Amino acid sequence: MRIYISVDMEGVTGLVDADDVQPGGRDYERGRSMMAEDVNAAVRGALAAGAGDILVNDAHGPMRNLLPDVLHPAARLVRGKPKQMGMLEGLTGEYDAALCVGYHSRAGAPGVLSHSFMGHEIEDMWLDGRPVGEIGLAHATAAALGVPVVALTGDDVACAEMTAWDASVVTVPVKYAHDRFAAELRPPAEAWKAVEEGVAAALTPAPPRPAPATAEATLTVRWQSASVAATLLGIPGVVSEDSRTIHAAGRLPALYRQFGVWMRVAASLTGQAPYC
């Protein structure tokens, strides 16, 4: 069984603030250590369920948060950027299941460090008219490849978001949001045990695979900046809805890759720090 793990940071055990998850933050080094513990717990769970090949993608920020020497030796690591598939780099239809570790809720949700991909630069997103963030877009893209997302870890708001998207996904809350920068934390050892057991349960028995998608999807993004929306109209297929909202249609995962280009354009036009 081949398992793919996408690891974000905002939903990791014990982390609640930008200083925990941004390089240079006063608690970032501790945060990346906690990130490694969460993903290693997921790797142990996958191994317990019979996984023979595990690929981990460092999917947060600079994508250089996980240190190779502290990652479980049974897992391979994709590290660094740029990546054409960003948070899903390396995912192909050859994998039997995907796991989302350390994920967070979408922009506007009351979860810990909630946002959609770019801090406050993206105000909202919709996939085929349905509100979506990193959780839903990852799930839809994996499904389009014929790979089921079977487990997610994060705070309780992120877990609820995944359940609303797909109730069959096993969710493991490692903290309970009190606000965007505050949470009640599960003791680390308890959280890591829950992650390991949740992943093992999600993979036992081996999950059924969805049929790869063939229909087009429409991705709509409302930006904070009208300049970003206007610039993106230079990309063929991008259509304006209003001064700050654009959309494009296409098949996943190609549409996911195009969204990555949108973000790189946005990053070149804005220099504002996330989480403001």
Image (cartoon, rainbow, N blue to C red):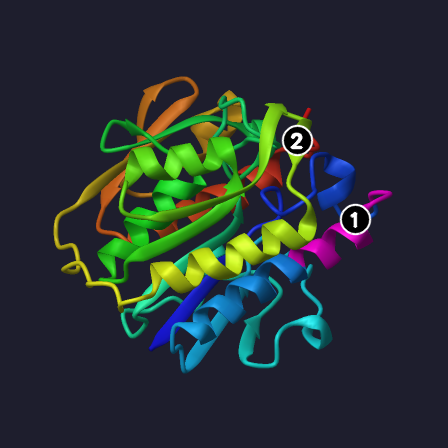
Residues drawn in magenta: 25-35
Query: Is residue 45 something that shows in the picture?
Result: yes
For residue 217, above or below residue 126: below
Q: Is residue 33 magenta?
A: yes
Q: Is residue 143 magenta?
A: no
Query: Is residue 234 something that shows in the picture?
Result: no
Residue 92 found in image quarter: bottom left
> Would you name the residue on which mark 1 appears?
28
Amino acid found under the numbered disc labelled 2? Glu
Find residue 167 and report its horizontal and vertical position in percent: 28, 40
Mark toward the start of the polypeptide (2 vs 1): 1
Per the image, label 1 sits on a secondary structure element best described as helix
Amino acid found under the numbered disc labelled 1? Tyr
Majority SS type along the magenta span: helix
Q: Residue at x 72, y 34 (%)?
A: 17
**Mark 2: few/some/many CA within 10 Å (<14, 14-19, 20+):** some
Report the mark closest to the observer, 2 or 1: 2
Q: Which residue is situated farthest in the top direction here?
A: 242
> Would you name the residue on which mark 2 appears?
184
Q: Residue at x 48, y 31 (%)?
A: 157
Which quarter shows the N terminus?
A: bottom left
